[in-house]
Image (cartoon, grey):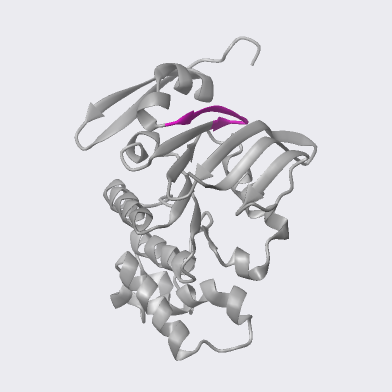
Amino acid sequence: MKALVSLRDVWVEVGGHTVLEAVTMEVGEGEFVSVVGPNGAGKTTLLKTILGLIRPSRGEVRVFGKPPWELSRKERARIGYLPQIQEIDPSFPLRAMDVVLTGLYGVLGYVRRPSKREREAALEAMELVGVRDLADRPIGELSGGQRQRVFLARALVGRPELLLLDEPTTGVDPAASEDFYGLLRRIQEGGVTILMVTHDVGVVSRYVDKVACINRSLVVHGRPEEVLTDEALAEMYGCSALFFHHGRAPHMVVRFHRKEGK
């Protein structure tokens, strides 16, 4: 399987502090990979490093075979990105369609008006994620789940090969979160490679191909049933951890304690 994303012994420092250390992993073409770990573990930094927004102090990062900061505009258009979403002012004047069209600014620039073809592409992306009927609604009037789908459509409007998502279900209720993960699985089955940061350790394990457990370093990386063990979770979270099944999805229960020397 060809690797679209490859990291080799990657170390990242931010503000004089080591945020990632000795991370080596790959995301193969067509895979759906989730990055999980505690707050402050370096998950968002990992995504920003893959995007080329942060450069490693050591190691090698490759996206489509190149360092991400060397990708051309055309090559960068092959990447869709959904960052962490902040709360939106209900009076924010943009319609849902306008938000999706901002995903084409890398091609359009900030001056040229979208053409009919580009508006059709935006509607197609909204159709894909199930929000085409919301095209003319103000973004501030939408529910959390609806907004996330609009922002996902923005990330998909350029028809990317690689989709990066950072905590895409923050602020979304559990039922909508499961629907969202199911939607991502269908998008992956349509030929998009997905790398997603999430805190939903138990739920997401039902949808992804592989899980990368991060706590500054890469604790473990592999299939969910192989890596989401009590030992890996204890190393990742610094606590006793176990899964139990109740209803549709597994959940994680933790009993915190500090490791010796930490």
Segment tinted magenta in the rendering: 214-222
Q: Residue at x 63, y 81 (%)?
A: 110
Q: Position of residue 186 (x, y in %)?
A: 31, 55
Q: Residue at x 45, y 42 (%)?
A: 33
Q: Examine the image and state in which quarter residue 109 appears.
A: bottom right
Closer-to-camera residue (246/109) = 109
Furthest residue to the front?
1
Q: Position of residue 36 (x, y in %)?
A: 48, 36
Furthest residue to the top?
260
Please state the total of marks drawn on the protein image.
Answer: 0
Q: Is residue 229 left or right of residue 88?
A: left
Q: Is residue 87 left or right of residue 179?
A: right
Q: Residue at x 47, y 83 (%)?
A: 118
Q: Decide: is 64 above or below 245.
A: below
- Quarter of the rendering occupied by the C terminus: top right
Q: Position of residue 17 (x, y in %)?
A: 76, 34
Magenta highlight on residue 31: no
State the predominant SS element of the stretch in magenta.
strand
Can I make out residue 161 in this image?
yes
Q: Examine the image and state in which quarter residue 13 appears.
A: top right
Can I make out residue 91 in this image?
no
Q: Is residue 126 left or right of residue 69?
A: left
Q: Position of residue 209 (x, y in %)?
A: 38, 40
